[in-house]
Image (cartoon, grey):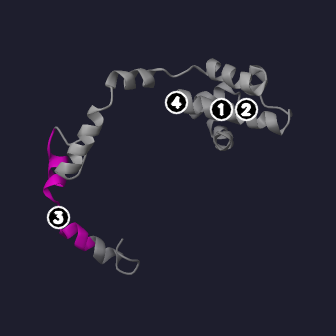
Amino acid sequence: MHGHQHRYKGYQRFVEQGIDEDIKRFYTKDNILGVLGSKEFRQERKDENEAIALLTLRAALQDRPPIKEVLKQVADITEETPQDLRTSGKKGRASSANRAFTMYAYKHYSGATYKEIAKYFKLTHAGSVCYPLTMGKQRS
């Protein structure tokens, strides 16, 4: 932002400028602003949010499918058994891709943690989930 050679001087000037009223209100009020910006910008965000049906949004967020449902749906599409999708093995490249997609779908639609995914798919640790999720995302 301030260039490589003058980054410290630039940052010092930035800090010395102080804070504007919006920033001051944002950090000093007990009831801080949810959106930081001009009055027009804040009003636009407020108007946008009022258009959202909160009950519909809450229902959508609570309707997270369980892993068995995700597994069943992917199994129906790929014509593999749920057991094959859950376990690794030498079943071929397509099967591995389907398994990765199942993990991705579970993460995406249920909001599961890496640890939960690793446990359900019988992986040794949560870090093993990263690569299949990346592969699964590419197939989506």
In this picture, residue 108 sits left or right of residue 87: left
Q: CA distance from mark 4 to mark 3?
A: 41 Å
Q: Which sits in the foreground, 87 or 58?
A: 58
What residue sits 70% from the left and 36% below the top?
100
Which label sits in the foreground, 4 or 3? Answer: 4
- Name the amino acid, label 2: Arg
Name the residue type under label 4: Gly
* Image: magenta residue range: 12-30
Q: CA distance from mark 1 to mark 4?
A: 11 Å
Give 2 or 47, whichever is nearer the viewer. Answer: 47
Q: Specify few, some or many for label 1: CA neighbours under 10 Å numbering under 14, 14-19, or 20 or more.
A: many
Residue type at the position of mark 1: Met
Residue 114 within the magenta-colored segment of the rendering: no
Alpha carbon of mark 3 to alpha carbon of mark 1: how far? 48 Å
- Quarter holding residue 137: top right
Which residue carries the number 1 mark? 103
| Dot placed on the residue nearer the N-terminal end, 1 or 4 | 1
Q: Which residue is mark 2?
A: 99
Residue wearing tag 4 = 111
| Residue occupying the point 44% across, 25% down | 61
**Most frequent secondary structure within the magenta stretch:** helix
**Which of 106/89 is in front?**
106
Residue drawn where x is 23% and y is 52% of the image: 37
- N-terminal label among 4 and 3: 3
Q: Residues within 10 Å of mark 3 (few under 14, many from 20)?
A: few
Give the mark, 2 or 4, whose residue is nearer the N terminus: 2
| 3 vs 1, front mark | 1
Q: Could you tell me which secondary element the residue under label 3 belongs to?
A: loop
Contact (Cβ within 8 Å) of mark 1 with mark 4: no
